[in-house]
Image (tube, rainbow, N blue to C red):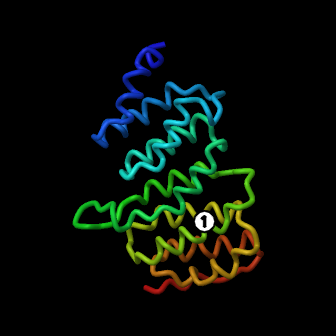
Amino acid sequence: IVFQSAAPLVRTAARDPNPWLRMYSARALRHVVESAAGREHPDVVLLRTMTADPDVNVATAAVEALTTTIAHAADPEYLAVLGRDDRATATGIEGVPTGYELIVAAVKGLEATPRTDVTIPMIEALDRLTADTRDTSRDPRLAILKWLAAHGDVAVIGRVKPYVSDFDPEVAVAATGVLLARAGIAVKATPAR
């Protein structure tokens, strides 16, 4: 009841120019939206819009809220997030790319999705993150490889195989897990460093 009475303020904050207010409003909307709400419920529409917010923290909070409220009804938004490239616009400390937690949130949202068109966007996100050659990209890359091991189709094998020699030893090991789980191919990780 408290959340419902605060809903008008939360909705106003969701459109504020301050990204911190938008982020916290997305977190609050998680408690306003009923789990039975459909994609077209006004608060769900607002959260869906917020997944495309230019601020990665706002988008992450919106994805997390959708995951806990309407789950797979928001799969199109999670897929859009996987295709999003924040490397040029979202920088953290000393210009290091951010947005990695947004990818992790989208991958979690797509866990056990009934959709069959998720594997290629996962691989494309993995390739894009790997191109950064940053140690900080480990978490989203591991999340993607874990998803591929559990849900990917055999078509990913050729795209995953090069990752057994990744610069990050943990990613290389995770890639061997995908090959074993999806194709029964046992290979040894040979990280580049």
Mark 1 Cα-neighbour bin, 10 Å: few <14, some 14–19, many ≥20: many
Residue 111, percent from left and from top: 64, 51
Give the farthest residue toward the left.
Answer: 94
Relative to residue 12, is residue 143 drawn left or right? right
Quadrant where the C terminus is found in the figure: bottom left
Above or below: residue 48 compared with residue 159 = above
- Judging depth in this view, the residue of 139 and 27 nearest the camera is 27
Above or below: residue 39 compared with residue 76 = above
- Judging depth in this view, the residue of 115 and 14 nearest the camera is 14
Residue 30, percent from left and from top: 50, 31
Relative to residue 58, is residue 4 drawn left or right? right
What residue sits 52% from the left and 30% below the top? 43
What type is the residue that disc 1 sits on?
Answer: Met
Q: Mark 1 points at which residue?
A: 122
Residue 12, percent from left and from top: 37, 28
Asked which quadrant contains residue 89, the reply is bottom left
Q: Give the tally of numbered discs.
A: 1
What residue sits 39% from the left and 34% below the top? 14
What residue sits 71% from the left and 61% below the top? 117
Residue 24, percent from left and from top: 36, 35
Above or below: residue 71 compared with residue 33 = below
Above or below: residue 161 compared with residue 34 = below
What residue sits 49% from the left and 57% below the top? 103
Q: Is mark 1 on a helix, strand or loop?
A: helix
